[in-house]
Amino acid sequence: MKSKIIYYIALYSVITFVSCKEKDWREDPKFQNQELESKLLESQKLITSKKKEKYILNRGFSNKEEAIKKFLSEIKNNKVPINSFVSWEEQLELIFPNTYGLGTALDHTPLNEYQVLLSEREKIAINSVEQLLTNGYKIEKFIWESPKRFNQILGYKPKVIISTPKGQFEITQIKMVYDIDGKFIVGVLGP
């Protein structure tokens, strides 16, 4: 009799465990998609709530070349850009309201995930630039593509040619310099 009771308890436990595991709502792709859609919608609302007629950058430089010179100088001397690169807050307030909806990853990525993505790209780019500048450098020339209008701001894609003791190199990690109401700042980095 005892063995039958133990058998039924064991059978009940196994059935309960298996059925609980199958019904874990957190593993349901529908729930995961709803959660992602909710985060994305929240991010989109935040970005669109910051749209304005005019944007003002409280810091920056008088021209795009000066912005890049300062950026490179800060990387060489400090290993990180201090004042020459847009902050996350400036991206939220100034850049994203102007670039949202123009076909970037921002259009379909929640802000918290986008911040991680950008941060990793920026770290890789900064490390690469820092390696180039370690033994000194001289800027030889800037080559600019035609500016792109992103609603209320302009973006300039640079080619920066530098000389180092190891030879001449093109810095490709600076992807965009923004012109925000006449002030320029390095705005996009990538590997």
Image (cartoon, grey):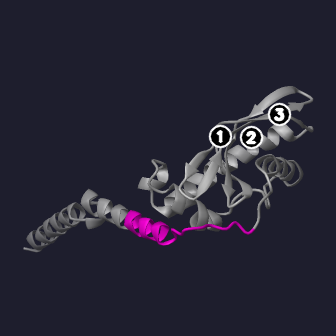
Callout 3: SS: strand
Mark 3 touching mark 1, by CB under 8 A? no
Sequence-first tag of 3 and 1: 3
Disc 2 residue type (three-letter): Ser
Residue 30 in the image: state x and y as whole percent: 25, 60
Identify which residue, 155 or 175, lies in the foreground.
155
Q: Residue at x 57, y 59 (%)?
A: 152
Check disc 3 and report the residue beneath it: 141
Tell me if mark 3 has few (under 14), some (14-19) or many (20+) residues whose alpha carbon lies within 10 angstroms of its own: few
Mark 1 touching mark 2, by CB under 8 A? yes
Instruction: Place residue 131 in its image quadrant.
Output: top right
Check disc 2 and report the residue beneath it: 128
Callout 2: SS: helix
Sequence-first tag of 1 and 2: 2
Check disc 1 and report the residue beneath it: 191
* Distance of label 3 from label 1 (alpha carbons): 21 Å
* Distance of label 1 from label 2 (alpha carbons): 8 Å
Q: Is residue 8 above or below residue 139?
A: below
Identify which residue, 78 or 43, lies in the foreground.
43
On screen, residue 186 versus residue 46, left or right, reads: right
Q: Residue at x 59, y 53 (%)?
A: 118
Residue 69 in the image: state x and y as whole percent: 84, 47
Tell me if mark 2 has few (under 14), some (14-19) or many (20+) residues whose alpha carbon lies within 10 angstroms of its own: some
Disc 1 residue type (three-letter): Pro
Tell me if mark 1 has few (under 14), some (14-19) or many (20+) residues whose alpha carbon lies within 10 angstroms of its own: some
Residue 84 in the image: state x and y as whole percent: 78, 57
Sequence-first tag of 3 and 2: 2
Magenta residues span 39-58
* Distance of label 3 from label 2 (alpha carbons): 19 Å
Q: Residue at x 62, y 67 (%)?
A: 55
